[in-house]
């Protein structure tokens, strides 16, 4: 087991966090939340603070009787003032701590790597006690994405632990928009930079249940691929035999390839992004060694999903399976109402293209939209369209995207037969 961080040239300019911890006392309400295991402490919950600190300094949270509650990463730039790493019991947050956390996470994901899959999420942020940090593996390349500059002083430990836990040759650093704008605290690090291993030349190829996909860790959405829909793609494969399939918001063709391997008669993929459509074509070429995939006719349409569905409806095109997997439609509470309207419109359009007895697959990745609201909207729209649905099943998160706290639940998917 590593006792010291591996020398990582790209991170040598990053200073370590202060050795002096920040003591914080919080409101009674915040004490209850912290004791319950919630990973966030907000600015307005702090009643007393020992000193100011920089992003990434360690903050220790106490109750009104000065009893230890938690320790986490301090972030003076965010309303989430402390992202909690350890509850109830004090701990040294160091290389050994990160190594233990990533070992725990890897153990949970063991069934995936044993199943002809080397693309999966190793660390799912708050849900793996690493708030604001995502680690995705794509074969020999890992992508570390940070959602706060508080992680920057800890990257040397994180990357050192990562390359000991899983056999990767390269680590790419990604940042969300807010973090990459805080250049003062990045110490020369850049979004998309390789912080360990050889340079990256174009996309990387990985396996998911034996199907090959390319991922662009530098320019792709999220970390390059949507790993959270793996199990739903498997479900589509089992339902697709002898069906004509429409995959809307297809991105790089994940559902399309699984449907093809499942014996679909034909697959039509629709996405507004031309680069995503081109990547989908390359993914199909990667898998031509599988006869089941190679013999399935593919149609690719680079067009706005709503416009494409309206056009196909007017052309009286029909399918045996319609998959609708839109991006997050509500990123704030104020967008929920509009998102539900958009979901209803998508369901109505999807049903207008679906033959009677066909399968509708309808997904939502908007955490702001509650499951009850989403499913009610889908069923109500179907009933109002005189196409009632017979539910097959509802699904949530896969094993590598665990739910550790209420706000961590976002993925919802319905499989149903339209009458």
Image (cartoon, rainbow, N blue to C red):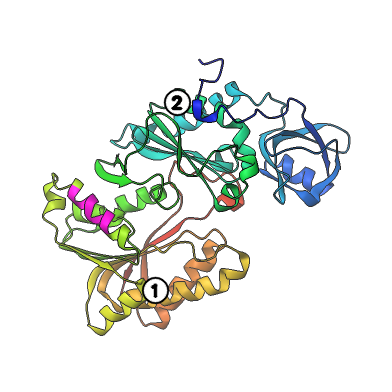
Q: Find disc 1 in the rendering and name its residue.
A: 347
Tell me if mark 1 has few (under 14), some (14-19) or many (20+) residues whose alpha carbon lies within 10 angstroms of its own.
many
Q: Position of residue 212 (x, y in %)?
A: 25, 43
Where residue 300 sits, quadrant-wise, is bottom left
Q: Position of residue 396 (x, y in %)?
A: 45, 53
What label sits on residue 155 in the rendered view? Answer: none
For image coordinates 81% across by 39% down, the residue present is: 52
Q: Position of residue 348 (x, y in %)?
A: 38, 78
Q: How many marks?
A: 2
Magenta part of the chain: 278-285
- Secondary structure of the magenta portion, mostly? helix
Q: Find disc 2 in the rendering and name its residue.
A: 163
Pick the front one: 255 or 280: 280
Which image quarter is the C terminus in?
A: bottom left
Where residue 244 sits, quadrant-wise, is bottom left
Which mark sits nearer the N-terminus, 2 or 1? Answer: 2
Tell me if mark 2 has few (under 14), some (14-19) or many (20+) residues whose alpha carbon lies within 10 angstroms of its own.
some
């Amino acid at each position: 087991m590593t006792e010291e961080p591996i020398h990582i040239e790209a991170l040598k300019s990053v200073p370590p966090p202060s050795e002096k911890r920040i003591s914080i006392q919080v409101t009674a309400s915040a004490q209850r939340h912290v004791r319950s295991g919630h990973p966030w402490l907000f600015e307005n919950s702090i009643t007393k603070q020992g000193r100011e600190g920089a992003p990434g300094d360690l903050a220790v949270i106490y109750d009104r009787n000065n009893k230890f509650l938690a320790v986490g990463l301090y972030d003076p730039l965010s309303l989430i003032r402390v992202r909690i790493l350890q509850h109830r019991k004090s701990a040294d947050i160091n290389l050994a701590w990160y190594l233990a956390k990533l070992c725990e996470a890897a153990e949970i994901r063991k069934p995936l790597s044993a199943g002809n899959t080397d693309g999966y999420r190793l660390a799912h942020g708050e849900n793996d006690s690493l708030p604001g940090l995502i680690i995705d593996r794509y074969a020999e390349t890992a992508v570390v994405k940070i959602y706060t500059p508080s992680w920057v002083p800890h990257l040397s430990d994180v990357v050192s632990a990562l390359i000991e836990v899983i056999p990767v040759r390269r680590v790419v650093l990604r940042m969300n928009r807010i973090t990459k704008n805080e250049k003062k605290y990045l110490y020369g690090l850049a979004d998309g930079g390789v912080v360990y291993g050889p340079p990256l030349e174009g996309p990387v190829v990985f396996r998911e249940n034996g199907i090959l996909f390319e991922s662009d860790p530098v320019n792709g959405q999220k970390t390059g691929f949507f790993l959270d829909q793996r199990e739903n793609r498997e479900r589509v494969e089992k339902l697709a035999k002898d069906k004509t399939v429409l995959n809307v918001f297809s991105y790089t063709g994940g559902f399309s390839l699984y449907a093809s391997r499942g014996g679909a008669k034909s697959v039509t993929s629709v996405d507004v992004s031309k680069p995503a459509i081109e990547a989908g074509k390359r993914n199909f070429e990667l898998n031509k060694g599988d006869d089941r995939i190679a013999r399935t006719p593919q149609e690719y349409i680079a067009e706005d999903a709503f416009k494409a569905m309206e056009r196909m409806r007017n052309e009286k095109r029909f399918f045996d399976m319609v998959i609708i997997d839109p991006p997050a439609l509500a990123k704030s509470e104020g967008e929920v109402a509009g998102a539900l309207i958009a979901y209803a419109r998508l369901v109505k359009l999807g049903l207008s293209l679906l033959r009677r007895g066909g399968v509708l697959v309808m997904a939502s990745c908007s955490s702001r939209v509650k499951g009850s609201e989403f499913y009610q909207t889908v069923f109500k729209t179907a009933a109002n369209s005189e196409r009632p649905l017979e539910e097959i099943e509802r699904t949530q998160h896969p094993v590598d995207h665990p739910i550790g706290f209420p706000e961590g639940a976002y993925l919802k998917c319905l499989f149903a037969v339209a009458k």
